[in-house]
Image: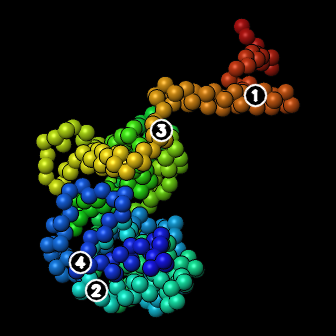
Amino acid sequence: DPHATKFRTKPYAVYHASFDQVLLLDCDNVPLRDPTYLFESPAFATHSAIFWPDLWHPSHTIFSVQAQNLLWQYVDMPFWDVFEQESGQVLVDRRRAKDALHKLMAYTFGARQDGTLIESMEFLYGDKDLFRFAWRNTSTSYHYIQTPPAFAGMYSWHRWISFCGLAMLQHDMDGDHLFLHRNQVKLTASPSQVPLFTHVLRFTGHDPHLYRAECKGRQDGYLCWGFQWPWVPATLDTIDWSEDGGGRADRKHVNIHQAEAMAVRFAIEAGAILGEVDADVPLTPLPLWRNWGVDVIVCSAVLLLWCLWQHVAQCWTPQKKTLFRSMFMSRKKRKTSTLPGHEQH
């Protein structure tokens, strides 16, 4: 189908798959362990699909899935206040979701195969929410993972942006790490690329409305993400870079570093096989002395401007007491009173 391009490829692939049960992963989504246990899980046995939450919800979103959106009238559904969907991973039982899959194709391609109102009116962004809307509109049951995504990224206490989140860390039904969606730093064929992630920033609050993600800015060429500090309850965990994962092989302590390193190695090997070697030099953090040097220069410039402003204020208003005068100018000696009865003896 020539219309099955860009975000439409994923719904199209699920709809036309030859398998009855399908686990669909984005190409930049790395399983942290064998995910096949999901097919035998009670959640999947009870429901026809398992979906995962995104970083956004109606009270805090960069998209338009909010109560006042005309989307709800278009899909003929009442508004419901839940996390938006992240479709970097979806698990579907096609046999029990036929109605939902037909609705998914209608949402994706439209009646005339030339685009949909959802896309043209920007009701939704790509395919990321189409699955849950199709399932809900057809009253098809699905399980929604309750643990919101964490961030995996780089942490350096001396940086302007101390934690730079570059990947989404998704969980399973028990809240254990399962998928590392490396969506802010893509795998390439460059033989010089290396694993990057050193820490995990995870939400520790109980009220989902306190979960507020935001873009922290660009650092070393990366677009960094994290939580709104200090309003979001969160904790920072160190990723174990040891070869044996610290001797812990259980599901709660999956070695994220080993999984990322393996994905990087496979990407390099694939590039060599295909003859597509990326010559771009990977971005690396600035050394400590250069970061401190930038900080010193900025602070010195601010101090110089402040002193200059105080000097100008003193020149224009010589009698006015300024902070600069009170700090650096000598005070006049107070005269002794000469009123009667106050003479010094």
Quick check: marks 2 and 4 in contact, CB under 8 Å? no
Within 10 angstroms of label 2, few (less than 14), some, or many (20 or more) residues? Answer: many
Sequence order check, earlier mark of 3 and 2: 2
Instruction: Identify residue type, mark 3.
Output: Val
Give residue 117's mark.
none
State the CA–CA distance, disc 1 to disc 3.
Answer: 43 Å
Quarter occupied by the N terminus: bottom left
State the CA–CA distance, disc 2 to disc 1.
Answer: 71 Å
Instruction: Identify residue type, mark 2.
Output: Ala
The residue at the point 30 percent across, 78 percent down is: 17
Measured from the top left, where is residue 61 in percent x and y? Answer: 49, 67
Q: Nearer the viewer, mark 1 or mark 3?
A: 3
Quarter occupied by the C terminus: top right
Give residue 97's mark.
2
Measured from the top left, where is residue 249 in percent x and y? Answer: 13, 49
The quadrant holding residue 32 is bottom left
Sequence order check, earlier mark of 2 and 4: 4
Q: Nearer the viewer, mark 3 or mark 2?
A: 3
Q: Nearer the viewer, mark 2 or mark 4?
A: 4
Q: Nearer the viewer, residue 248 or 94?
A: 94
Sequence order check, earlier mark of 4 and 1: 4
Measured from the top left, where is residue 137 in percent x and y? Answer: 38, 89
